[in-house]
Image (cartoon, rainbow, N blue to C red):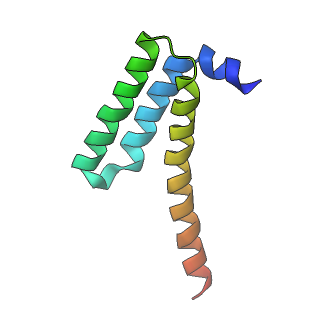
Amino acid sequence: MLYPILVEYYVWWCIALLVVTWFTRVHQGQKRSNFLYGYAMLGAIGFLLDLDWMAGVIFGLLVLEVGKKFKAWLDKKQAGLGK
């Protein structure tokens, strides 16, 4: 069920990954640029070579980026509970 949606909106998932990476790695400078170039390259190669499975990879990377920020937020909340 999810796979056809991922393939159908592949370009939008790639754009969403780049936008989320831009905002989640604001304070990392050069590392953020490297991730953006890498993710854009993965998206472009997957699109040009018509690799349908790359949609799952892009979605997984998007989940990892959002999950990293969510985990940091939860850790901050947990530290606040200890006070």
Q: Is residue 6 rendered to the left or right of residue 39?
A: right
In this rendered view, identify the residue nearer to me: 73 or 52.
52
Q: Quadrant of the N terminus?
A: top right
Q: Residue at x 55, y 70 (%)?
A: 75
Give the x, y percent position of residue 23. Answer: 40, 44
Q: Is residue 1 rendered to the left or right of residue 22?
A: right
Query: Which residue of the protein is positioned furthest toward the right in this rendering?
Result: 1
Q: Residue at x 45, y 19 (%)?
A: 46
Q: Is residue 53 rendered to the left or right of residue 14?
A: right
Q: Eyeballing the image, is 54 above or below 76?
A: above
Give the x, y percent position of residue 39. Answer: 38, 32
Q: Eyeballing the image, is 83 above or below 56?
A: below
Give the x, y percent position of residue 67. Answer: 56, 52
Q: Eyeballing the image, is 25 above or below 83?
A: above
Q: Quadrant of the C terminus?
A: bottom right
Q: Which image quadrant for residue 74?
A: bottom right
In this rendered view, identify the residue nearer to me: 36 or 47.
47
Q: Eyeballing the image, is 71 above or below 63?
A: below
In this rendered view, identify the residue nearer to me: 39 or 29.
39
In this rendered view, identify the residue nearer to me: 9 or 48.
48
Q: Residue at x 45, y 26 (%)?
A: 15
Query: Which residue of the protein is positioned furthest toward the left in this rendering?
Result: 30
Q: Residue at x 39, y 19 (%)?
A: 45
Give the x, y percent position of residue 32. Answer: 30, 45
Query: Which residue of the protein is positioned furthest toward the bottom in this rendering?
Result: 83
Q: How many marks?
A: 0
